[in-house]
Image (cartoon, rainbow, N blue to C red):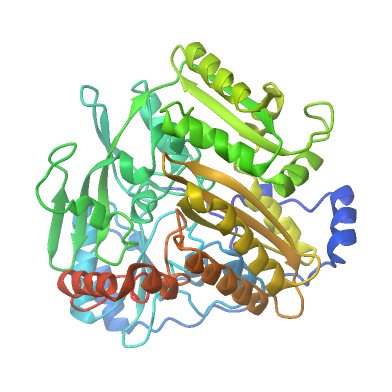
Amino acid sequence: MTHREMHPQRWGDPAHATPLPDSSKELVDLIFGANDTPGAASVEVPASQLAPELLDSLAALFASPDQVLADDETRRLRTRGKSTPDLLKARVGDLSDAPDVVVRPTTHEEVAAVVAWAAEHRVAVVPFGGGTAVTGGLVAARDGFAGVVSLDLADMDRLLSVDPVAMTATFQPGVRGPAAEELLAAHGLRLGHHPQSFEFATIGGFAATRSSGQNSAGFGRFDQMVVALKVATPIGDLEVGSSPLNAAGPDIRQIVLGSEGTLGVITEVTVRVRAVATETRYEAWQFESFAAGQAAMRHLAQRQLLPTIIRLSDEAETAINLASQTDVGGEALTGCLMIVGHEGDRIAPQVARVAEELTALGGTALGEDRGQSWVEGRFHAPYLRDSLLDVGVLVETLETATFWSNTERLHGAVKTALESSLGEGTVVLCHVSHVYETGCSLYFTVAAKQGDDPLSRWLAAKAAACDAMMDCGATITHHHAVGTDHKAWLAREIGPVGVAMLKGLKASVDPAGVLNPGVLIP
């Protein structure tokens, strides 16, 4: 099977990699004093550390030699994810985390055989979906292991079944977001899970990281969509999900969801689906302040009036976004921009009711042009990050979540931490990305001078921001997952008892510790 590969040193489709326009580069030079960075270094992939006899016994598990790949190019393409630290390392030729071999199973049985083989021979296994991880979740610890295997699930890309009565569908884990929608559309259905990584991320990755998409206000997070799972573990197969909900002890589905490949490899995911939308409408609204816009969001959420999509940019992000939309919307805009999207069947009553409420709460309707512009560009931001890295600007994102009563404090604390760490000229943008009755997620974008050591600069700034989140009583991550980057703060968030529970699960299910070692578990 052929799958579109992401650029090894950038985000996404190599065909979409474009330089920063001259007009934008002039603005960047003015703000950051940026300069073109050196071209990406080219180095050899480190030699595989897996013993030949182990490689032979691994290959014997598969029907085709094409399913076991140890060539340098394949191993390079399965090195790390797509965080800014990942890309900075790739750009200087650091491939020290390359796996020793890549395997491509097509069935649950092949995955289970690899997991059993790895446990027997103490070889680390890293499940690989779309490669869009941004918190170090694809970097396994090597110490004490005979090697590292990348378990590439790309060829497990089938829609296994559809239940049109219960409105559920069962997928293999390697199905990418667009393919899932295409497969379901043939049945008149849709999934409706569209994170920014949608074009490359997979069903299994959505489940393993507790993904949350841009349609979460209307469709819920991915963990709310999942009704059943099949998982290969070192001690046997796990199948959970005999009913929509139950009271049969702790929900084991929720233990697997968000486990990031540390407790087992997800091989089947059954999700709730919905009918294809017959009508859509995407609008822009203006609020005088970030606080006023949040109050309007909270009002809708607490009265069960949320549309399918609702997002609110703070004043800084609004200004930057509108500066890049010179052909959209007419007059200049102040305050904060809100995007509201409606998707479904006979949406007119909902559109009218939400508009009535937002107007009463101080919102000004701006029409559909800016809303449609957002939809058309909703997956493009990571490409802009690459273009900015090319000209010497350090760009990265981070996110958190808290209760409504704490958002102002959290927003200010994280922004201050980033600006203090990165220094003069730093730009910090924020938007409310996901909304609930009791609170919301804040998503930050940071741009600063790269300096002589951009990786160290960012790691220090990220640590300061994470400390600020903890000091404010917020979560370390709402939807980016834990990986290796957030482990220290996860321990602080869940406390020693929570850590003991995670370690106990890990020791029971993966006694040899071969599943994504070093990830998630503090």
**480 up-or-down from 301: above or below:** below
Instruction: Please tell me which residue is depicted at 45% across the width and 54% down the height of the picture.
Output: 478
**Residue 451 position within the rendered picture, expressed as x and y whole percent measured from the top left:** 77, 76
**Residue 126 position within the rendered picture, expressed as x and y whole percent measured from the top left:** 36, 68
Q: Is residue 158 visible?
A: no
Instruction: Please tell me which residue is depicted at 66% across the width and 29% down the height of the picture.
Output: 285
- Residue 119 falls in which quadrant of the image? bottom left
Q: Nearer the viewer, residue 363 or 489?
A: 363
**454 up-or-down from 352: above or below:** below
Instruction: Please tell me which residue is depicted at 56% across the width and 55% down the height of the picture.
Output: 6
Q: Nearer the viewer, residue 19 or 323?
A: 323
Q: Nearer the viewer, residue 157 or 438?
A: 438
Q: Nearer the viewer, residue 341 or 306?
A: 306
Instruction: Please tell me which residue is depicted at 89% across the width and 48% down the height of the picture.
Output: 23
**267 up-or-down from 506: above or below:** above
**Residue 512 position within the rendered picture, expressed as x and y whole percent measured from the top left:** 21, 79
- Residue 364 falls in which quadrant of the image? top right
